[in-house]
Each structure stands twice: as structure tokens, then as C-alpha cells.
Amino acid sequence: DVKVTQSSRYLVKRTGEKVFLECVQDMDHENMFWYRQDPGLGLRLIYFSYDVKMKEKGDIPEGYSVSREKKERFSLILESASTNQTSMYLCASSLRLALYNEQFFGPGTRLTVL
Amino acid sequence: AQSVTQLDSQVPVFEEAPVELRCNYSSSVSVYLFWYVQYPNQGLQLLLKYLSGSTLVKGINGFEAEFNKSQTSFHLRKPSVHISDTAEYFCAVSEGGGGADGLTFGKGTHLIIQP
């Protein structure tokens, strides 16, 4: 079974802090994704990566950056956290050559910025 | 470009009653379709998927969905719901071909089971 883990389930930070959210997958997937989930808005793609050191902006990249130094790990960085970044953050991974792009999700990190 | 519409943001239903969660998609090519479930404070879990073949797809926890190409729909059904089915349900579509940005999600339907 694919396993995607996220470093924290719950996180509370203060405005202006630098925040790191870590995601690790153990199935050698090439693709990794970061989404944020807000009530009524569904899942919105922040960034994705299709290979080590490669990244592409998703629909809402403003205020975020990412890092992929190793194939299994994909980090989301909030350079200066703001209250409007309070949200649920979901990491996912998939095989690059999978025809149908099924994604496997981690348990999520609920981030509160005070 | 592909898109997904989940017509109901919330669906309240009594325990042991049947339920249908609606999903419509738009795409100019053949698609692959998914339903994911998210239980409270958890990540998304695959419920079922349509890749090809039979249009009636069975998933986990007694759920099934039917792919209707002419109506571009992929509605999710369960004949008798349980309180444990309370969750958020997401429909997703892929046009395939691999790649990193292949899944488009609907906004979700919150299934509320009333005792």
C-alpha cells in the first residue's frame, strides 16, 4: 500500500513566522502535490513537482514556496505566515507514467495562524 | 480543459435510507473518474474509480457509481447509509496521459447522516 505521511496533524503558528510542512511518500512516486482545502472551495492546488528539484505552480502559489531535494520528500514553505493561510493542507503523490493519474493522499495538516 | 461539478454542497439523509451524490464533468476526450472520501480530520481516501469496461463500478463500504457517458455523469450511490458514512465526498476526473497535473476535483459534497 502506498503510504503518504505528513509531519504534523495540527500546527499553530504566529503571523510572520516561517512555516515548514513536510510530506514523505514511500512508493517511489515521481509526482507530488500540495493542496489546501477550505470549506466550500474544495481542494486547490498550490504547487506540484514531477521530479527532484522540479516544481510547477498550481492555482494558488502566492505566499508559498516548495522544495524537493529528494524523490520521497516534498516540503511546503510559508515564508511569512498570515492569518489567511489558516487552512487544511493535504499532500498527495502519484506515478508519473500512470495513465489515469490516481493520487494518494496523506492525512493532512491543519494549520492555524494566529 | 476538464472540469467537475458536484451539484450539492450538502446532502442530509436519514440512517438506513438510500443516497445519491451527483457529479457531472466536462471534457473533450475520454476520461477516468474517481470518488474520494474524507472522514473528519483525515486525508482523502479512494472510494472507487472508473477506468474502462463496465460502467457500474463498485467501491469500498458498499458504495457504487455509474458512469454515464451521454450525460457526462458519475453519480455515487449507496442503498442504505450508516452513521459512519458521514464525511466529505469528492469527485475527480482525469483525461489521462500521465503527467503531474492530471486530476481535477469537484468542490465536494458533505454527506450528513441523521439518526
Image (tube, coloured by chain):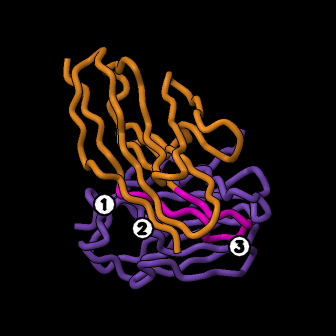
Chain colours: A purple, B orange
Range shown magenta? B93-107
Which residue: 64% across, 58% down?
A93
Marks 2, 3 in one chain: yes
Residue B56 relative to residue B98: left or right: left
Closer to the chain start, of discs 2 and 3, is: 2
Give the percent coordinates (x, y) of residue B42: 43, 42
Residue A29 relative to residue A38: left or right: right
Q: Do the residues labelled 2 and 3 touch (CB within 8 Å)?
A: no
Near-viewer residue (A7 or A1): A1
State which quadrant residue B100 falls in. bottom right
Let me know if residue A84 appears in the view: yes
Give the percent coordinates (x, y) of residue A77: 49, 75
Which residue: 37% across, 27% down?
B85
Closer to the chain start, of discs 3 and 1, is: 1
Q: Do the residues labelled 1 and 2 touch (CB within 8 Å)?
A: yes
The amino acid marked with disc number 2 is: Arg
Q: Indicate which disc residue A50 carries.
A: 3
Callout 2 secondary element? strand
Query: What residue is disc 1 on?
Result: A38
- B22 relative to A96, above or below: above
Query: What residue is disc 2 on?
Result: A44
Q: Indicate which disc residue A95 carries.
A: none
Magenta stretch secondary structure, dominant? loop
Q: How far apart are marks 2 and 3 (CA)?
A: 18 Å
Give the percent coordinates (x, y) of residue A61: 45, 81
Closer to the chain start, of discs 1 and 2, is: 1
Q: How far apart are marks 1 and 2 (CA)?
A: 8 Å
Q: How far apart are marks 3 and 1 (CA)?
A: 25 Å
The amino acid marked with disc number 1 is: Asp
- B47 relative to A44, above or below: above
Give the percent coordinates (x, y) of residue A26: 74, 50
